[in-house]
Image: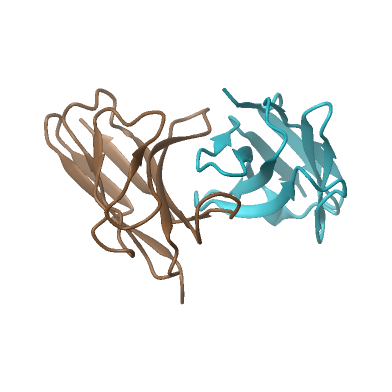
Chain colours: A cyan, B brown
Amino acid sequence: AQTVTQSQPEMSVQEAETVTLSCTYDTSESDYYLFWYKQPPSRQMILVIRQEAYKQQNATENRFSVNFQKAAKSFSLKISDSQLGDAAMYFCAYRRRRNNDMRFGAGTRLTVKP
Amino acid sequence: DGGITQSPKYLFRKEGQNVTLSCEQNLNHDAMYWYRQDPGQGLRLIYYSQIVNDFQKGDIAEGYSVSREKKESFPLTVTSAQKNPTAFYLCASSIRTGQDEQYFGPGTRLTVT
């Protein structure tokens, strides 16, 4: 079974600084997708970034980037120039390529201090 | 605007009653999903549907039922057999199953007393 682990229940960062959220996963598959979702206080789940396992290049979306280490089964999210609006729960998720079964981590609550 | 709607945002029921949560999408997505979110936990899959008139159980389907009579709609019924129904329920959809990311609705908070 695939599992996703987020070892940091809570993190905080000063506005304008950089923070990295950790995620590890367990799988025997070689072809899969990884995602980071953001859930603000409104509880709307918003896709932040996605990574295909077959791509070696790390995905980037504006201030958000990932460090994907396939051999280590690690998928961390880096948020640069943190903004107050980045405060939210962040969930790491895994899904096999041909499967609908998306697995989520327990989440990391990010606080941004002004 | 295209999107996923869930109604109502808050729902209260007495124990022993069945309750149906609504999920509608106008994104022309083939696949739809229902998740449950409990405090301190990530999302867990209840049911999903790849096409109309077809659906599959997820990890925690016991005590729940779904239907998919229309492409746009995927209602979830929480039956009296669900032992701990109080939770936050999220509906999602994707263009097709497999590689595409899922887009989520705003969720429904169900409280059963």
Q: Residue drawn at (67%, 44%), measured in percent from left and top?
A: A33
Quarter of the C terminus of chain B within the rendering: top left
Report x, y in % for residue B29: 45, 64
Left or right position of A8 against B50: right
Residue situated in front as seen by the camera: B70 or A113: B70
Q: Is residue B11 above or below residue B73?
A: above
Q: Residue drawn at (43%, 36%), measured in percent from left and top?
A: B45
Q: Is residue A97 above or below residue A85?
A: above
Q: Residue drawn at (71%, 27%), measured in percent from left and top?
A: A8
Left or right position of B92 against A25: left
Which of the 4 image quarters holds residue A70? top right
Report x, y in % for residue B110: 29, 41
Residue situated in front as seen by the camera: B8 or B67: B67
Number of marks in the image?
0
Q: Is residue B48 above or below residue B103?
A: above
Report x, y in % for residue A102: 54, 39
Which of the 4 image quarters holds residue B74? bottom left
